[in-house]
Amino acid sequence: MVQVILRALEESEEGLSIVQLQKELNYSQGDVTKTLKYLSVENPSPVMKIQSKWYRTANPYEYDTQKVETITAIRRREWEEMQNYLDTDECLMMFLQKALNDPSPESCGKCAICTTPLSSEFAHEIGVKAAEFFRKSDIVFKPKKQVKPDALSEYGIRGNLRELRAEEGRILSRWEDAGWGKMVAANKHQGFFEDELVDAMVEMIRKWHPEPYPIWVTCVPSHRHPELVPSLAKRIAQKLGLPFVDAVHKIKDNQPQKMMHNAYHQAKNLDGVFRVDENIPAKPVLLVDDVIDSGWTVTVVAALLKAKGATHIYPTALASTGKM
């Protein structure tokens, strides 16, 4: 990443802001900012900042492999020591004393280990209640509000989405969590979502009960798994007593959204990818997807549905990867 950023700055005569570097290089804002800060404190520094833009200086830069490996080794040892602290069954204070080379470590008699030793046994009823809690802990999803300039140029969408923005949605679980997440992950790899997940989605939607209530159901399509989400959406629609309309079509392949590391590229990766049919029902619709990563896919599809006349878009999905 360091060399890529330096090369981009070197090729730019007018300098680049962090936002411009994100747009050009598909790195997150955090990664770009940290890299520039690291480079700026090098002596002599290969970069300099003038107002909001960064420039490549004439100072040569050589990646200090030994320094990086040394720091990485230190951080790895610290991480391992913290894991040992979390896993220890001895007095926590004694553990810390030993770590700090105290010549006479002693038990404190006050920490959680000393006073209430953890047991691997628990009542069956507690386990059942914990499982029920996780399986009813759905997630509120808030669609994106802003589109970066030129990110959706093929669609002619930019700036504040306003009337094209979807309504607040709901997600059943977090990917591979202790509730429904593990089943979602296993079913996705198998290529079919079980009826138990359909029932859980229907229960969540009925409990949520958005107003005005959706009158029809559609879904986000995929070329790699053409039947996976439509099958899920059709069964949800049937259980809710609503018609399923195959209104959204994928007309162009794109990279997986998880490969896009900032908002510009997450939106740009979807530009021109979907098409929505004409004459769709001008009524509230439930938009179904399986997994929401950045949230941009349902945001873009919802904007296209609204542009064609759908009045309210309610996104819903089985799981979130937590990157929204």
Image (cartoon, helix red, strand yellow):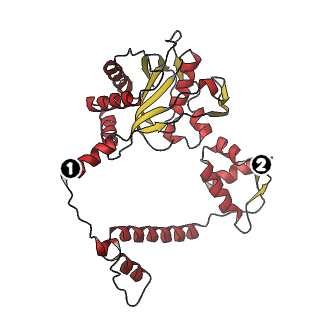
Residue 15's tag is 2
Q: Is residue 260 left or right of residue 203?
A: right
Q: Specify whether residue 192 is in view.
A: no
* Displayed quadrant of residue 207: top left
Tell me which residue sits at (34%, 23%) in the image: 236
Question: Mark 1: which secondary structure?
Answer: helix
- Count up the numbered dots: 2
Residue nearer the viewer, 241 or 65: 241
Q: Is residue 80 above or below residue 173?
A: below
Which x, y percent locates residue 23?
66, 41
Q: Is residue 175 left or right of residue 143?
A: left
* Distance from Cα at disc 2 to Cα at disc 1: 63 Å
Residue nearer the viewer, 60 or 86: 86
Which x, y percent locates residue 289?
42, 29
Disc 1: CA contacts within 10 A as few (<14), some (14-19) or many (>=20): few
Tell me which residue sits at (59%, 47%) in the image: 28
Single out the residue that lies furthest toward the bottom. Answer: 103
Which x, y percent locates residue 284?
49, 18
Q: Is residue 178 left or right of residue 214?
A: left
Question: Mark 2: which secondary structure?
Answer: loop
Question: At label 1, which amino acid type do we have?
Answer: Glu
Residue 42's tag is none
Q: Which is more foreground, mark 2 or mark 1? A: 1
Tell me which residue sits at (47%, 16%) in the image: 247
Q: Are marks 2 and 1 in contact (CB under 8 Å)?
A: no
Question: At label 2, which amino acid type do we have?
Answer: Gly
The residue at which mark 1 appears reads as: 125
* Displayed quadrant of residue 133: top left
Name the N-terminal-most of marks 2 and 1. Answer: 2
Which x, y percent locates residue 99?
42, 80
